[in-house]
Image (spheres, grey):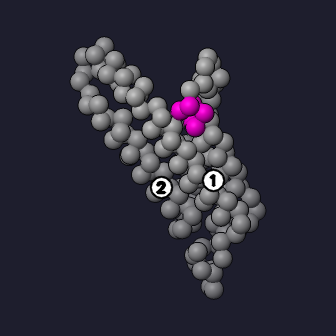
């Protein structure tokens, strides 16, 4: 049976993905304008759908990592999640400069949820569960 820490990981990680979706939707207009401005400056024409496609690809990778950790108990996916979290910490300082639009509030909440999810991966019961693959009588759920 899946330990409580892994259940909290599921809720927090999937919640962070949902909050990231809210961040993307609420900031899409600004992002599209930034891509258009960069495209005009660099002379390289980018489709206005480029941010949408990039975000969809990123969410697909996040969901794949969640599936590999939560359902298949793949340890390397756990470390990739940790790496992505650490890389996302680079942007934390930008949240506290100037006014904070709604999209940044969603982004900060998503980061907090992701921190909770990563912390759950290092609890004792989660470590034992992740290392104890396919134990007899231990359902995946």
Q: Secondary structure at mark 1?
A: helix
Rendered image: mark on residue 12:
1
Magenta segment: does it hold 105?
yes
Rendered image: mark on residue 120:
none
User: Can you say whether 8 is above or below 52 in the image?
Assistant: below
Q: Position of residue 94 (x, y in %)?
A: 59, 23
Location of mark 2 (residue): 63
Q: Position of residue 88 (x, y in %)?
A: 57, 36
Q: Report the front residue among 114 and 107.
A: 107
What secondary structure predominates along the stretch shown in magenta?
Answer: helix
Task: Look at 58% across and 51% down and name the residue there.
Answer: 15
Q: Secondary structure at mark 2?
A: helix
User: Can you say whether 137 is above or below 2 in the image?
Assistant: below
Q: In what quadrant of the picture does the N terminus appear?
A: bottom right
| Distance (Cα) linking label 2 and label 1 | 13 Å
Q: Is residue 86 visible?
A: no
Tell whether 1 sits left or right of 46. right
Magenta stretch: give its range: 102-107
């Amino acid at each position: 049976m899946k330990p409580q820490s892994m259940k909290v990981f599921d809720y927090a990680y999937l919640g962070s993905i949902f909050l990231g979706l809210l961040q993307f939707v609420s900031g899409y207009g600004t992002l599209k304008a930034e891509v258009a401005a960069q495209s005009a400056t660099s002379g390289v024409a980018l489709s206005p759908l480029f941010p949408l496609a990039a975000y969809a690809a990123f969410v697909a990778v996040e969901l794949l990592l969640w599936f590999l950790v939560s359902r298949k108990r793949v340890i390397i996916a756990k470390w990739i999640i940790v790496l992505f979290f650490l890389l996302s910490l680079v942007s934390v300082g930008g949240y506290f400069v100037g006014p904070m639009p709604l999209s940044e509030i969603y982004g900060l909440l998503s980061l907090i949820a992701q921190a909770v999810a990563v912390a759950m991966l290092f609890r004792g019961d989660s470590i034992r569960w992740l290392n104890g693959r396919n134990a007899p009588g231990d359902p995946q759920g």
